[in-house]
Image (tube, rainbow, N blue to C red):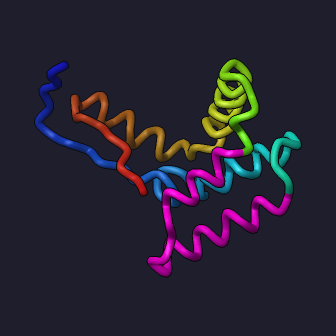
């Protein structure tokens, strides 16, 4: 697919487009549904600290984060994804939605680039 745009608009997600950490929001979403335990919030914060310190093993983090979800069928995971998306959509500030829409209406190529 070829996209022609005069301007490229790049957006960061966490603490830019949204005023919170999307990873923590996902963990809290799963904790709130009893899928993960409250201890998983602390584990996620530890990963964030390791990331800032430059010591994070991203592969180990991904394995640990995905392991509890592997027991569920794709249909269940897809349902959680839809529910999470609905909840997060409500948390996007109107000013950020307007900013992205302005770029889209101007014909800019918009992309989220985030860690």
The residue lying toward the viewer, choosing from 1 and 51, is 51
- From the viewer's perspective, is residue 21 above or below residue 75? below
Q: Residue furthest bottom?
A: 53
- Left/right of residue 75 with respect to residue 111 in the rendered view: right
Magenta-drawn stretch, dominant element (helix, strand or loop): helix
- Left/right of residue 17 with respect to residue 11 in the rendered view: right
The residue lying toward the viewer, choosing from 66 and 77, is 66
Indicate the quadrant where residue 6 lies: top left
**Residue 4 location, x and y as percent?**
12, 26
- Left/right of residue 60 with respect to residue 84 in the rendered view: left
Magenta segment: does it hold 39? yes
Locate the C terminus and report the quarter of the image it occupies: bottom left
Residue at position x 58%, y 59% from top? Answer: 61
Locate the N terminus and report the quarter of the image it occupies: top left
Magenta segment: does it hold 17? no
The residue lying toward the viewer, choosing from 93 and 40, is 40
**Residue 10 location, x and y as percent?**
30, 48
**Residue 72 location, x and y as percent?**
75, 29
Residue at position x 33%, y 36% from top? Answer: 102
Range drawn in magenta: 38-67
Residue at position x 85%, y 54% from top? Answer: 37
- From the viewer's perspective, is residue 18 above or below residue 81? below
**Residue 23 location, x and y as percent?**
61, 53
């Amino acid at each position: 697919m070829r996209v022609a745009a005069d301007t490229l608009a790049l957006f960061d997600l966490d603490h830019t487009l949204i005023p919170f950490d999307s990873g923590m929001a996902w963990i809290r979403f799963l904790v709130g549904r009893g899928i993960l335990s409250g201890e998983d919030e602390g584990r996620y914060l530890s990963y964030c600290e390791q990331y800032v310190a430059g010591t994070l093993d991203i592969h180990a983090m991904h394995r640990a984060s995905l392991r509890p979800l592997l027991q569920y069928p794709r249909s269940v995971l897809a349902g959680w994804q839809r529910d999470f998306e609905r909840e997060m959509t409500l948390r996007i500030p109107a000013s950020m939605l307007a900013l992205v829409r302005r770029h889209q209406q101007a014909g800019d190529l918009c992309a989220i680039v985030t860690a």
